[in-house]
Amino acid sequence: MSRPRFDDIFMELAVNLAKRSHCIKAQVGAVLTRDTRIISIGYNGPPAGTHNCDDEFPGVGCPRDSKGSCSLALHAEENAILYAAKNGSEIEGATIYVTLSPCIACARIIYSMKIAHVIYLHSYAEYKGIGSDEGVDFLRRFGVKVDRYVPSDGFVLHSEPPIPRKAALPTVP
Ligand SMILES: [Zn+2]
Ligand SMILES: [Zn+2]
């Protein structure tokens, strides 16, 4: 068996972090790294001490925003970046691993924080059934490197698509 790359290790961690999310709409995990060291982690959910979507809105799901996402949640990238910023970690030049490609709002934050590289597992556009990954397009346009994760030969990522845990979303053709 070959040695896993850091890409494999960090993406697997992001996938496991996603499973901690209380959100009903989607579960997303993120790992923020610099020089192959982890500086922060995050998963999507309302700010600590506020709501637990799955407890408060069982079955019906959390209140949606105009794009059908949880209106209460910070995204995984936001949580990872906020924690690093709050603790004074150096974020410029970092790499972020995320299980779902960044939405446009997160893309703006990633760009503003001068994160150099985004590696994502699932496509937000595919998940939402929309034509283009606007977050990815924005980041690439303004010089942030974005790659879709590809497992190393022989490495099996135990990944699940970012689907709801309890409520079914309409299937994307
Ligand atoms: Zn929610
Ligand atoms: Zn986002």
Image (cartoon, rainbow, N blue to C red):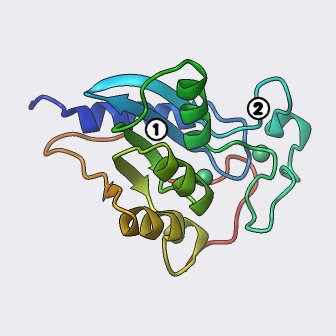
Name the image quarter holding the C terminus.
bottom right
State the residue lying farthest toward the top: 87
128 is higher (above) or lower (below) than 86: below
Judge whether residue 159 can be spotted in this image.
Answer: no
Occupied quadrant, residue 87: top right
Give amino acid for label 2.
Pro
Residue located 36% across and 36% down the image: 94
Query: Does residue 66 appear left or right of residue 138 in this picture?
Result: right
Residue 6 figure quarter: top left
Whether residues under marks 2 and 1 lie with C-beta atoms below 8 angstroms apart, the answer is no
Residue located at (58% from left, 62% from top): 104
Residue at left offset 9%, top offset 32%? 2
For disc 1, the neighbor class at 10 Å (few under 14, some 14 to 19, many from 20) is many
The amino acid beneath tag 1 is Val
The spot of residue 138 in percent (x, y) is 47, 67
Asked if the beta carbon under badge 2 is closer than 8 A to the nearest atom of ligand 1, the reply is no
| Residue at the image point whose x is 35% and y is 56% from the top | 144
Q: Which mark is residue 15?
A: 1
Q: Earlier in the sequence, mark 2 or mark 1?
A: 1
Q: For ligand 1, give the image quadrant.
A: top right
Name the element at disc 1: helix
Disc 2 crowd rating (10 Å Cα; few below 14, some 14-19, many 20+) is few
Circle 2 sits on which residue?
A: 47
Residue 112 location (% of width, % of height)? 51, 49
Front position among marks 2 and 1: 2
CA–CA distance in space, label 2 to label 1: 20 Å
Q: How many marks?
A: 2
Q: Secondary structure at mark 2?
A: loop
